[in-house]
Amino acid sequence: MNWLNELYKINKREPNKEIERSLVNAIFRIYDRFPRIGLRERIGQQEMSLDIADAYIQGHNAMIEAGVGIGKSFAYLIPSLLTNQMSQKPVIIATSSIQLSEQIHKDLRTIGSRLGFSTVRSVVGKGMGQYACRSRAAELISLSDANSSVSTIAQRILDYEIDERADIKAGVSDVEWSHVSVNDCKFERCHHKTACLFYDMRAKLNAKTHEIDFIIVNQDLLIRDLMKKKEGTKSIISEQPALIVIDEAHNLEAKVRDARTLEFTYRGICRILDNTVQLLTKQSGDKSLFSQSKFIKNCAERIFKRVNADLLHHAKQDNDRIKVSDIKGIPLNQVSNDLKDFSLRLSILTSRHEREIDDAFEAINGLITLIRVLSELEDNYLLWASSPLGVATISICPKDISQFLKYTLFNGKAPVILTSATLCQGGDTLEEEYSYLTRSLGYRGEFMDRKSSPFDYTNHAMMYISNKVPYYHHDQRENYLEAAYQEMVQLCNLTHGRTIVLFSAKEDMKYIHKKLMSEVKEYSWAVHVQKEGSSQDSVIAEFRKSKGVLLGTGVFWEGVNIEGPDLSQVIIFRLPFPVPSDPVYEYKASVTENPFMEVFVPDMLLRLRQGTGRLIRSETDLGILSILDSRLSAAAKKSYREQVLDTLPFKKVTEDFAVLEKFVQNKGIRRTD
C-alpha cells in the first residue's frame, strides 16, 4: 500500500488540486481492484465515493440519496478510509440503529482487510441503556427476591454472562432491562469499571485524535455529543474528525428531537437531587441543601399527582402524548430559585470527578428548563405527558431543531455527508427534491445527483392497491380492520405466506394478530409477531425458517434485509401518515401555509418509501407490494396519489386482484417448497 503512504505525504505538502487528483486516482485504483478481490462494483457506488471525496477536498457538506442495492456502505467507507489515512484524523459514522452500527463495523473490517488497510482502529458506541450495569445488578440482588426474573438477569450480569442487552438471546422486556442497565454511571468511582463494556467504550470514543481511526455510533450519541459541545461541557466523542457520515439520515430530525427531549419522572427528579446534594455536601458540608432538596421533591410530587390525573382521564394507551394541565398553587418560582442555586454551586465546584459534576450540572439545568416551561416563562418548547412503561412522564422538547443543527453540525468545521435510500420527494430540481429534509434539518451544503437503485422493478415487481377496504375512521375502526383482515389473508394465501405486514399503529397489529391466532386452522402459513425490545433477529430467523407471515411495526419499516424467496410480499396495512395531534406535527403544521402537503404527505412518503424498500433486496428478487388503503385508489381521487406513484419505483400498478394473481403465477412467486 505504498500509494497510500504517498497520498498521506501529498496531503501534508500540496495544495487542494494535487490532493484532489491524488484522492480521485486512489478511488479509481480501488474500484479497478474490485474484481480481483472478489467484490462487484455497483451502479452509482463509484460516483457516490467520488462525491464524498469532493466534499472532503472542498470542505463542504453533501446530501446524497443512494438507492437500495448500490452498496451504500462501501461507497462511503472507501473514501472514509482514504481520508483517515491522509489526515490521520478519525472518521465519525452515525447510523440510526444499533444493528446498522454493528453491520457497518463488519463492513469496515471486510473492505479494510481486502484493500490492505491492516490496522484500522475502530469502536462502536451505543447509548448507556444498551449496557448492563454490575453496580446496579449487585444492589438489586441484595434487595430483591432471588427467584424473580430480574434477579436472574442481575446474577448473570454479575457472573459476566451478560455485558449488554444483545447478549440476552431470548430477549428481555423494556421494564425488566430498565432495572439493570447503565443509568447515571459513576464512571471513575465505580468498582466494576475495569470489566465494564460501557466504560471501555466511552474511553475509546473520547480518545485523542491520533489514537482512533473510525468511531461508529448511533445518531442519538452523535447528537448528545453535539449538545454537550454546544453547552461547553465535556464531550463524548473525539474532537476534530476528518469527516462525518450520517447514514439513514431521513431519521435525523426525529433522532434530534428525541435526543433534545428531556423526560422527567418523579423518581428521576429525586435521583437528580440526591446526586447533586451528595456532590455538593462533600465539599461544603452545607446541611441546608437537604431542606432545599426536600422542598423541591415535595413540589415535584404535587406536580406529578396532577399529571397522573390528566393521564387517567385523557390517555388511551401508554404512548399517547397528552397536554399537561396548568400548574397552579405550587410555588414554581421558589423551586426555580433553589434549582438555580444548585446550578451555581455545581458550576464552581472543583473535584477530580469532573464528569459526574458535568452530568449533575446538565441534569439540574434541565430541571430549571422544565420549571420555566411549566411556569409559562419559556415558550420555545413543546410540553406533553405520557406513561411509557406505565410510569407518568413529563417531556419537553425545543420547537425548532433546525437552528441547533445548522450551528452545531453544518457549521463547516468538518464535512458532513447525509445519505439514505429515502431523502427525496418529487420536484423539478435537486433543491426541490431534497427540500423537505433541508427545511426540517436546517441543512446547509451541496445536493448530489440521486443514485438510483439498479434493481429491475419493472419486470420483477408489481404494486397492488386495494379499492375494497373502507376508509379508516377511528369511530368505525373495527369495520376497517375486519375488511383489511379479509384482504390481507387473501394476499398472504396468494404468495403462500412469505409476507411481512407493516402496521403504522400497534393497536391495529395487536387486533390482527389476535384474530389470526383465533383462526389459525383456516390457513397453512405460520404467524409471527414483532417482539418487545430493540433486537428482532430471533423473530426474523423464525419467519425465514417457517416462510410464514410476520406482523411488525416501528423497526420493521426499515433496516430489515431479507433477500430471496423467503420474502415475496410486503403489505402496507395503512398509509403511514403521522398523527395530527402529536405535539411535534401539530407545531410543524402551525408554521406552514399548507400543512397537509408540506408536512403530512412528505413525512408519509419518507416512511412509505422505507417500508416498500423491504421487498426487493437483490437483482434476482421477485415480489409484490400490496397497500390496503383505498385512499390511494384511483376512485378516491386524492391529491397525493400521483406523488406516491411517481416517488415509488414500482412501474406495474394494479387494483385488479386477478391481474396481480396472474403476475404471481407468471413469475413463479407462489411456491410450496
Image (spheres, helix red, strand yellow):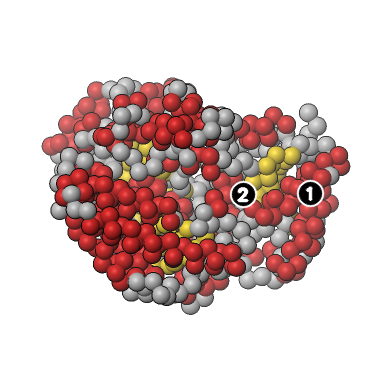
Where does the image place residue 105, in percent across and percent down from the top left?
41, 32
Do we see residue 78 in this rendering?
A: no
Where does the image place residue 635, in percent across and percent down from the top left?
75, 69
- Disc on the earlier residue, 2 or 1: 1
The quarter of the picture where residue 545 lies is top right
Mark 1 lies on a secondary structure that is helix
Mark 2 highlights which residue? Answer: 553
Disc 1: CA contacts within 10 A as few (<14), some (14-19) or many (>=20):
few
Disc 2: CA contacts within 10 A as few (<14), some (14-19) or many (>=20):
some
Kindly check if marks 2 and 1 are in contact, taking CB atoms under 8 A apart as contact.
no
In the orientation shown, which residue stands out farthest toward the bottom? 593
- Please give the label number shown on residue 515: 1
Q: Residue at x 33, y 74 (%)?
A: 377
Does residue 378 sit above or below 449 in this rendering? below
Q: Amino acid at mark 2?
A: Thr
In the orientation shown, which residue stands out farthest toward the right? 522
Mark 2 lies on a secondary structure that is strand
Where does the image place residue 320, in percent across and percent down from the top left?
57, 61
**Horizontal arrangement in the rendering, residue 40 relative to residue 491 (left or right):** left
Q: Residue at x 52, y 75 (%)?
A: 594
Q: Give the quarter of the figure containing the C terminus.
A: top right
Given this view, does label 2 or label 1 mark the residue nearer the observer?
1
Where does the image place residue 406, in percent across and percent down from the top left?
31, 60
